[in-house]
Image: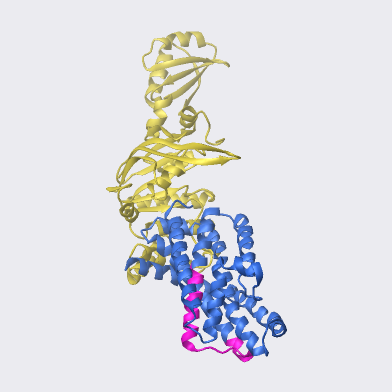
Amino acid sequence: MIETKGLRKSFKSRQGRETKTVEAVRGVDLFVQEGEIFGFLGPNGAGKTTTLRMLATLIEPDGGEATIAGADLRQAPGEVRRRIGYVAQGGTTWDEVSAREELVLHARMYGISKAEAQRRAVRALEAFQLTEYADRKCKTYSGGQRRRVDIALGIIHEPKVLFLDEPTTGLDPQSRAHMWDEIRRLRGEGITIFVTTHYLEEADALCDRMAIMDHGLIVAEGTPAELKREISGDVVTVGLNGSTPKAAELFDTEPYIKKLETVDDGGLRLYVDEGATAIPHILRKLDGAGIELGSIELHRPSLDDVFLEKTGRSLRES
Amino acid sequence: MKPFRDTWLIFQRQTLLILRNPVWLIIGVLQPLYFLLLFGPLLKDALPVSNAAEAYRIFVPGLLVMLAMFGAMFTGFGLIAELRAGVIERSRVTPISRVALMLGRALRDVATLLVQALLITLLAIPFGLTVHIGDLLLAFLMLGLIGVMMSAASNALALKLKTEDALAPLMNGLAQPLLLLSGILLPLTGWLATVAKFNPFAWAVDASRALFAGDAGDPKVWQSLLILGALTVAALMWAGRSFARGVR
């Protein structure tokens, strides 16, 4: 649904008297399948928003190519505009008009007739549970309501692809969960969704596949599970009451254990591919050797671990 | 057809917003009204005229040009607010004509200032202003051109500067000399009159006075329309390109 090759963009920035060229995006290759939710992560300044704005036809790429929903980004940006929806980060509604007025006008900007635009507005208001406030001014809405209007605007022309730039930033946990449901519902309607986010748990819970961007390049791409497996696999920590050296000897030759470390307070840290399948083996082995088990713990890597490994930064500090 | 339909869409929305909150429309009338009431009476003695009515016939046509200049000149501030709200970016991801985004807003400014100009003209009649309807329409056409030109230029600058802090000093810096060198307040003489030849608004003021004097055949009229027409086209192209390029 989205395919990019070597997409590039640099900006000239002036610092004092010197003009510096900043390479914001240095060659991005992406492949997004039809009907999936694709997450796009990266620290601030990684080039996420620039990439998104290029794909949404808002800025022109310096180089590379992209096809979105079958239309060529550089040859036919007008056609791309017809087939995509884009919801910017900071909100997109005007204080003094109502959600209904915004929806009707926005639909008409796509060349849709007035009557049809009004019908679609009614449907969108209903789908996003906004009917109750439909004719109040946007400035009276809560953050979550206003965000729902933004998304309703983004899909009023029934696009094939929807770009969402940090759709849940600034929302309270309840509105965020609500937004996730909306996004899943849109996927259910067959819209391919390309979403940037700052929240790893969001990417983990919401996205079918994701890419991590850093310094203008894609540094990792895959399903959340694949990415997590790629970095280290699972860690099984066993607490042993005093018989650590004997157990270490026991596990040293086991093929499913990639690495083994001794824990300071008596115990072993075992690095395995799949914790769930390794644990029965570990238990049986200990039992067979008559070693008493104090405790057992399984740690699965989080996306934060992936992020840290790929970008050298924790997402929280970036 | 599409650019016209798109322009009409934007114009409708923008006009709706003004009608919903007409305070700026009224503030726009206040400035020329103050000049009419508080400055106009002084002119009888300052100008080489025999009575007050004659002074108003010279002063009010210039006042209308001033109204058109200032009415549209500060429209960029509204655009910056729209940029900040994300409305412009949302429009730019749709296939709507880029020229329409700008022209729809410029025509809103023209509509506003023509309503204001009509109001001032009517209010000036009791003071002795006289005009033929044909001449008035021609004068209003000229005011409309000034409105489109100033609106487009103001919006193009707003898209370039992106903050009120940068736009405000620039606009004020331009507004004062343009006003003083237009001959609206007092007739220009000496070297000031020479400098004013490069001020398109000075031409507009002369043409407006000729029209209100019932002299549509005065060469100043077509010359002024030509100059303003060319500048309007240039401003439209500039602003249209700014809207098409990457603005946030």
Image side of residue B139 versus residue A124, left or right: right
Magenta stretch encompasses residue B215: no
Image side of residue A192 versus residue B140, left or right: left
| Residue for point 70% across, 85% down | B44
Colour mapping used in the image: by chain
Residue A216 spot, x, y in % from top left? 45, 35
Q: Is residue A135 visible?
A: no
Residue A199 spot, x, y in % from top left? 49, 41
Q: Is residue A264 visible?
A: yes
**Which stretch is magenta?**
B122-148
* Farthest front residue in view: B190
Residue A213 spot, x, y in % from top left? 44, 35
Tell which of B122 and B22 is nearer to you.
B122
Q: Report the predominant secondary structure element of the magenta stretch.
A: helix
Specify the chain shown as yellow.
Answer: A
> Vertically, is A239 above or below A75?
above
In the rendered image of the structure, the colour used to display chain B is blue
Tell which of A77 and B219 is nearer to you.
B219
Residue A269 spot, x, y in % from top left? 49, 18
